[in-house]
Image: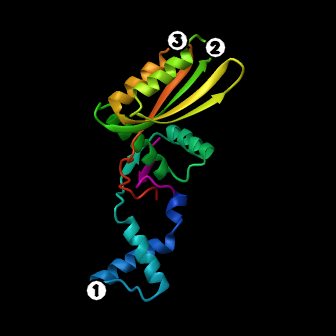
Amino acid sequence: MAAPVFGGLGDAAESARRPQEHAGSIRSRETCRRTGEPNHGTLEGARVWRYAVAMSNLSRIGVAIETDLLAEFDALLAERGSPSRSEAFRDLIRDALIQESAAKGDTRVVGAVTLVYAHHVRLLSEKLTSLQHAFHHVMLSTLHVHLDHEHCLEVIVVRGKASEVRHVANALISMKGVKHGRLTITSPTPPGEGGRGRR
């Protein structure tokens, strides 16, 4: 069975979302060619021009994907409430770029270290606090929650060079008495955003 091909990573719903704007954007470009400037004198002309400008930095590509894999992907998007395939693909690309960048030791990152630990373990709380003080320039904030009589949850927000952030996280997670720990890293400036945010 032939694999579906997507132009621009979009779906039918996404393509149909702004049919008038799409048609209007073509007319606005024709207007530009004739007069050098679109007609802003009408509400429709202004709306179409804004849409055309917003879309000007997007590139459309084709992706071939197995039908069964696509069906599973669509089911996952529906479960998560994702707005479109295009946005889901952009999220996957951003995540891959962030993880690749974070693997370089000198990259600036932000993240969160999540710890679940047994608070009654001798000197553990003091050691955790002491380590955070030793690397105070990496620590931004700490959330402490008492889960039950035995266990505490601590979420530590960190920022700095990827190598140092990982070093601190590993030191915290590896302490005796920590039942579970995880470091989640992201970038202060997500790739491809350029300060514009999501579309």
Residue drawn at (37%, 51%), measured in percent from left and top? 62
Residue mark closest to the camera, 1 vs 3: 3
Q: Mark number for residue 120?
A: 2
Q: Earlier in the sequence, mark 2 or mark 1?
A: 1
- Percent position (x, y) of residue 147? 68, 26
Determine whether the residue tagged by mark 2 lies in a helix, strand or loop: loop
Q: Is residue 119 left or right of residue 190?
A: right
Q: CA distance from mark 2 to mark 1?
A: 78 Å
Task: Single out the residue that lies furthest toward the right.
Answer: 149
| Up/down of 92 relative to 39, above or below | above
Identify residue type, mark 3: Lys
Please tell me whether residue 105 is drawn above or below residue 58 in the rendered image: above
The residue that disc 3 covers is 176
User: Sequence order check: which comes first, mark 2 or mark 3?
Assistant: 2
**Residue for badge 1:** 34
Main secondary structure found in the magenta portion: loop
113 left or right of 94 in image: right
Q: CA distance from mark 2 to mark 3?
A: 11 Å
N-term-proximal mark, 1 vs 3: 1
Secondary structure beneath dot 1 equals helix
